[in-house]
């Protein structure tokens, strides 16, 4: 599946009584304070802020509007993370990923030397922490005042060259300023002394809203075996054949999953299709006593992924799987085989409904495989 195919896929488918009373009151309060995550792409950068206002900006070059300096060159890695709240710590990562040579069938490992980093042809010589050792990634990290100084130093620049080699990986700074402005806005830092870009003096950092607490999600695993699981799966396949056809499922497949949700219901995950590197499934909720009454499950998505929840193939889940031990339904959709873009999500069943527990997403392909933007986080409480 190519990038446009992934976009289409997402658009179609992504104690005592007193103690319990206090617990659920706390859950409701935490969920009420949760903010909606955001995701956007600006020039050569993508930026996302999660449901606690933690923000991440990442260099991911556009395949359609790439600066001339990057054409034919290996992209380097750079990201800026900022925590929410008045303290709002900043972390910058600068790195180079290993490069695989298809002809030689081997991987080349660059070493990042901070003394050789150049900004538009001039040595920058940032003070960076020691590099990560071993593995396919050579990376430096900056935090605190060092990170802020680095951002100040590169403001207004165009290209970071990460080694002295003529084929050095590059980082484009086109769009970085706009990405940082978006982070400031999402965290309530506009016209504030703590803003990364054009910090005003109208309000002190203490005026920044605190980070919302992580929502608390209750997991309610069910217990007991299902000796007739295969029979239930077959009944649901026959009863919901119209859903399978509408979602272009392979009607002959039988690699299905049936698990208890609670004492009266099961979740039925029906495998649909498999492609070159991924497949997808449909999920149904059915009464154990009457599987023919199964109804399709459309799991909740953040607002920015509204098309995935409301499109003509909502309820399609890449590699969909339910873990009965943790009451968690998970899905992973890859934008392309290398896995440098995609969406991963988990939903926890609380005994009555599925609640979004985590989500990572990156529509633009680039960067490290599987290292997508974390956009939704929770705390999970498992109660038997």
Image (cartoon, grey):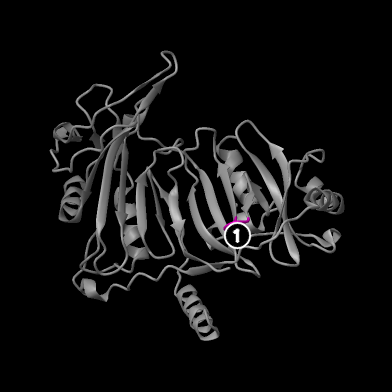
Residue occupied by mark 1: 327
Residue 327 lies within the magenta run: yes
The C terminus is located in which quarter? bottom right
Residue stretch rendered in magenta on the structure:
324-328
Q: Is the magenta stretch mostly helix, strand or loop?
A: loop
Q: Which residue is drawn at 53% across and 83% down?
A: 21
User: Height in image: 201 above or below 151?
Assistant: below
Decide if residue 260 is on the left or right side of residue 117: right
- Work out which residue is located at the far bottom of the displayed protein and give it: 18
Secondary structure beneath label 1: loop
Residue 363 screen position, x and y as percent? 50, 45
- Locate the N terminus by quadrant: top right
Quarter where residue 130 is shown: top left
Above or below: residue 237 compared with residue 110? below
Where is residue 159, by image quadrant? top left
Looking at the picture, how far across and down is residue 378, in whole percent?
Answer: 46, 63
In this view of the protein, which residue sits in the foreground, 300 or 220?
220
> With respect to residue 110, does 327 lie above or below?
below
For the point 45% across and 60% down, which residue is it? Answer: 377
Figure quadrant of residue 44: top left
- Report the residue at 22% width, 23% height from top: 165
Residue 379 image point, x, y percent: 46, 65
Residue 127: x and y, percent?
A: 13, 43
Tell which of 98 and 164 is nearer to you. Answer: 98
Left-right relation of 3 to 190? right
Going 78% across and 39% down the picture, which residue do you hit? Answer: 253
Q: How many labels does the image show?
A: 1
Q: Which of 265 and 245 is in front in this view?
A: 265
Binning the other alpha carbons within 10 Å of mark 1 as few (below 14), some (14 to 19) or many (20 upward) gives many
């Amino acid at each position: 599946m190519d990038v446009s195919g992934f976009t289409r896929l997402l658009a179609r488918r992504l104690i005592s009584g007193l103690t319990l009373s206090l617990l659920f009151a706390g859950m409701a309060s935490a969920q009420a304070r949760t903010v909606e995550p955001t995701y956007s792409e600006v020039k050569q950068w993508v930026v996302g802020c999660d449901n606690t206002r933690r923000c991440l900006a990442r260099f991911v070059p556009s395949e359609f509007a790439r600066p001339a300096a990057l054409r034919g060159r290996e992209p380097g890695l750079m990201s800026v993370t900022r925590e929410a709240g008045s303290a709002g710590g900043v972390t910058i990562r600068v790195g180079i990923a290993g490069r695989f040579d298809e002809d030689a069938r081997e991987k080349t490992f660059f070493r990042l030397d901070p003394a050789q980093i150049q900004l538009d042809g001039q040595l920058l010589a940032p003070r960076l922490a020691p590099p990560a050792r071993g593995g396919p990634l050579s990376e430096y990290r900056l935090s605190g005042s060092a990170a802020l100084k680095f951002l100040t130093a590169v403001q207004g620049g165009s290209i970071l060259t990460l080694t002295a080699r003529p084929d050095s990986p590059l980082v484009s700074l086109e769009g970085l300023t706009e990405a940082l402005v978006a982070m400031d806005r999402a965290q309530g830092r506009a016209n504030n002394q703590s803003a990364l870009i054009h910090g005003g003096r109208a309000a002190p950092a203490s005026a920044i809203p605190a980070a919302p607490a992580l929502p608390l999600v209750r997991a309610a695993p069910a217990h007991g075996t299902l000796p007739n699981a295969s029979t239930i799966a077959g009944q649901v396949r026959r009863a919901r054949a119209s859903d399978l056809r509408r979602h272009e499922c392979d009607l002959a497949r039988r690699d299905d999953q049936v698990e208890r949700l609670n004492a009266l219901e099961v979740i039925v995950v029906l495998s649909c299709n498999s492609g070159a590197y991924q497949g997808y499934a449909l999920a149904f909720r059915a009464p154990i006593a009457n599987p023919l009454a199964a109804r399709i499950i459309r799991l909740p998505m953040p607002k920015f992924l509204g098309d995935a929840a409301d499109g003509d193939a909502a309820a399609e889940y890449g590699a969909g799987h339910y873990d009965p031990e943790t009451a968690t339904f998970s899905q992973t959709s890859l934008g392309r085989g290398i896995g440098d873009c995609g969406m991963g999500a988990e939903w926890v069943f609380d005994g009555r409904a599925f609640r979004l527990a985590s989500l990572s997403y990156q529509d633009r392909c680039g960067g490290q495989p599987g290292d997508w933007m974390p956009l939704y986080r929770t705390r999970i409480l498992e109660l038997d």
